[in-house]
Image: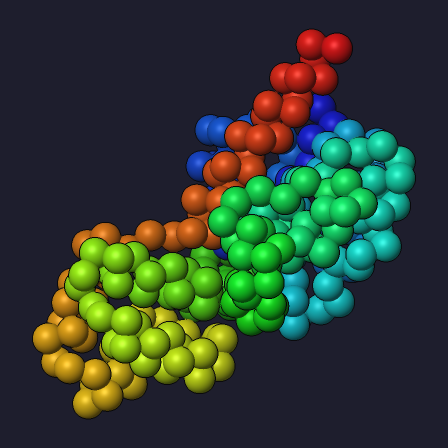
């Protein structure tokens, strides 16, 4: 769709994203990319992924600039969720569970969604804390682990530097710290039922942008 730009990287493969939304897909946003998109006649911007620690992150003022110009700017999953939680009072549209968690203050750190990825393919090379947190919650909900075990697993995960986070590392550091049967059950859950919350929120956001496009065509 002409005028629709989505900044996307490790949260979802572009080829998969195209099944939900026809748009111009650009790499994770850096400082100035939103301003550039606005000045290049974008009509709708989807901010999913952006850089955190590798370079200067997307500034609030450039999103506000786009909103002042009348653009629809949708945020979800990663940098988009974080910025939407901060700027929804000014008109930025936040989508998904991660956005809601930031908005409600249940998570506050950039570290929740940070990860490292292949700079060429954008394939994730570590697991974001928010996904680990979500799968611990789901395992607790299914009775696979108890709340105490979940707290230990989450604290161990928080203690890892974000590029080092993976389920394999978590399993290793958890040995001897939680009951063997609980650890075995959580391993099996991850191997068979784990979910990717960042990916799920991204898909919901792409569908929302598609709905906005459809509504604009009806005007």
- The quarter holding residue 127 reads bottom left
Can you say whether 94 is above or below 180 in the image? above
In the image, is 183 to the left or to the right of 2?
Answer: left
Seen from the viewer's position, the closer of residues 114 and 87 is 87
Residue at 32% in and 80% down: 152
Give the quarter of the figure containing the N terminus: top right
Q: Residue at x 12, y 80 (%)?
A: 180
Residue at the image position 28 percent from the left and 71 percent from the top: 147
- Mark yes or no: residue 114 visible: no
* Vertical relation: 101 (above or below) 136: above
Q: Position of residue 55 (x, y in %)?
A: 71, 69
Residue furthest out toward the left: 181
Q: Going by the image, does 91 lie left or right of 113?
A: right
Above or below, 214 against 130 in this view is above
Residue drawn at 46 percent across, 63 percent down: 130
Decide if residue 62 is on the left or right side of residue 152. right
From the top left corner, tell me how far across and down residue 39 is, in percent: 88, 39
Residue 158: where, in percent of width, then height? 45, 78
- Is residue 146 something that shows in the picture? yes
Q: Residue furthest bottom?
A: 176
Left or right side of 15 for 38: right
Tell which of 39 and 139 is nearer to you. 139
């Amino acid at each position: 769709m002409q005028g629709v730009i989505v900044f996307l990287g490790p949260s979802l493969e572009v080829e998969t994203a195209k099944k939900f939304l026809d748009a111009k897909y650009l790499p994770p946003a850096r400082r100035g990319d939103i301003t550039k998109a606005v000045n290049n006649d974008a009509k709708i911007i989807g901010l999913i992924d952006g850089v955190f620690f590798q370079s200067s992150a997307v500034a609030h003022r450039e999103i506000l600039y786009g909103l002042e110009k009348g653009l629809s700017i949708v945020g979800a999953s990663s940098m988009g969720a974080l910025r939407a939680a901060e700027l929804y009072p000014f008109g930025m549209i936040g989508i998904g569970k991660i956005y809601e968690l930031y908005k409600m203050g249940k998570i506050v750190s950039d570290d929740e969604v940070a990860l490292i990825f292949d700079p060429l393919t954008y394939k994730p090379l570590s697991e974001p804390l928010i996904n680990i947190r979500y799968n611990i919650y789901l395992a607790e909900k299914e009775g696979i682990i108890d709340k105490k075990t979940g707290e230990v697993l989450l604290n161990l995960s928080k203690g890892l530097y974000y590029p080092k986070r993976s389920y394999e590392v978590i399993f290793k550091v958890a040995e001897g710290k939680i009951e063997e049967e609980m650890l075995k059950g959580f391993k099996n859950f991850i191997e068979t039922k784990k979910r990717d919350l960042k990916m799920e929120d991204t898909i919901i956001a792409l569908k929302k942008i598609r709905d906005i496009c459809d509504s604009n065509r009806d005007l």
